[in-house]
Image (cartoon, rainbow, N blue to C red):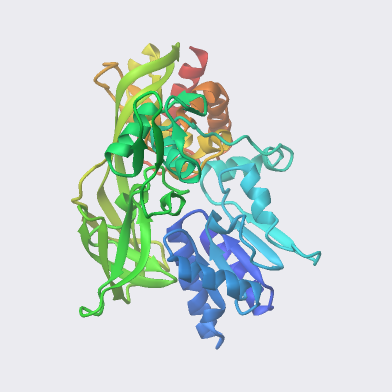
Amino acid sequence: IRRSSLYEAGRLAHKALSFGISSILFTGSRTNVELLLKSLKQQLLKDGKDPGSVRGYRSGYLPAERRETEKNLRNGKLKAVVSTNALELGIDIGSLDLALIHGFPGSIASVWQQVGRAGRRNSISAAVIIPSGLSIDQFLAGNPGWLLGASPETARIDPLNPYIMLEHIKCAVFELPFRANETFGGQNITDILEFLSAHGMLGAFGNSDTRTYSWNSDNYPAASFSIRSASGEKYDIYDVTSKQKPMLIGTMDKHSASALIFPGAVYFHNGESYSVREIDSENKRCFVERSLSQTFTEAKVHVRTNIVRCEEGRGLFAWGETKVSASAGMYKVIDISTRKTVGHGTVDLPEDRIDTTSLWITMPEKARSRPGLLPAMNGLANLLKNLAPLFLMCDSSDIYVSTALSEPTLKQPALFLSDAIPGGVGLAEGAYDSIRSILMACREQLDSCRCSDGCPSCIGTVNSGIKAKDLTGKLLDDILCT
């Protein structure tokens, strides 16, 4: 039985602290940051040491809290920090001796950025990568040349994404007014300028041929431009333990909120547990109370994809505009120490709906006539979810995967890989361009995994007796040979 990678990461971080080695521990999710932080603080208390010598760092912490952590890392008051990729680059945190990287961070470039966080001032340093049980980590553990011998990737971004472009234009016009018929990035943006003017953000002066647009708001537009969410929508999280004085303790982008904050969920902040009491979806507010719970919650997100328009296709593969709906219908309550499921619950919140872009794979005729198509499609979806980011320079949370036995437009079984960012940023098109390479990597990981019939390192955990791993392999072969 393989030891939990999260446990191993925490063990190494605790060992480093016990020897006075200043360190940074990177992990891929907010939940992992908080679970590791909670564990490290508890171990330091048992050792009779100051639990305040280790802090967390991730999106959702308030700016003042993050600045304090950065300052205390620089001056040596903090001995360790547990972080997502939020501390990967661009922030001076002084000199650290050890970088621990729990799980592949989504790109080769990110790996080297995180490794470089240790020993930045010519001191002796070390970096340790701790692979998780996910398919992508196991693939890289078995093929280290992908990680150590390859050049950093090219980032994918669609500058014409309407959500992103709108925010860029706000920032540009703040710096210098636009004239009528002036282009931005080679695009005519008169409609966008008129839209911003109609909503009071810009002042428009002159007639249609000589009109000038200038910033007309007291707000500084760059301050509200989120680098983590294209739409910029977020939830404010309030601690209402003291009923008389609710306190804003954090924020969360709308995309992440649907799976992490809902009535009954356990929310973590700086290693402390909170129970989610209420969600105000209309005003984007979440109310939490302090809790002594030794559990965490994990939601199962159901994704539904509908095709709007095909942009390009060849054979079984195509990509285009889609509408994607995501909702957390069920959640598990998991014991922190044993990782055993100790309860279940349902989530009753509105769906998160976005207009985006998707790659879709229509199932070949040979596979459609074989029993067990849905388990095979779900197995392949799990492989794609975990391995596609290796080719797309993104995190697995940046994409949705879904399956449909009869999509309304295709009227055939299909598997979808969708951009989780409203409007899309090129991930679906990139997957379309690289789909055969991605599928061959899926086949390689399936062959190298030593499980008998499904595990988190390949197709995910499945009900026994289905032979889903074998069915997934046959489906992959059918697709690659078509």
Which residue is at the front of the view, 160 or 428? 160
Q: Can residue 213 be seen in this view?
A: yes
| Placement of 479 over or under 276, stated as above or below | above
Residue at image point 46% right, 72% down: 38
Residue 5 quadrant: bottom right
Which residue is at the front of the view, 390 or 190? 190
Q: In this view, does 283 lie to the left or right of 204?
A: left
Residue at image point 56% right, 44% down: 106
Which residue is at the front of the view, 401 or 84? 84
| Placement of 153 over or under 64, stated as above or below | above
Q: Is residue 98 left or right of residue 460?
A: right
> At which x and y percent is residue 27?
54, 57
Residue at image point 55% right, 54% down: 85
> At which x and y percent is residue 385?
45, 37
> At which x and y percent is residue 210?
41, 27
Q: Can residue 4 be seen in this view?
A: no
| Placement of 395 over or under 324, stated as above or below | below
The number of numbered badges drawn on the structure is: 0
Residue 327 quadrant: top left
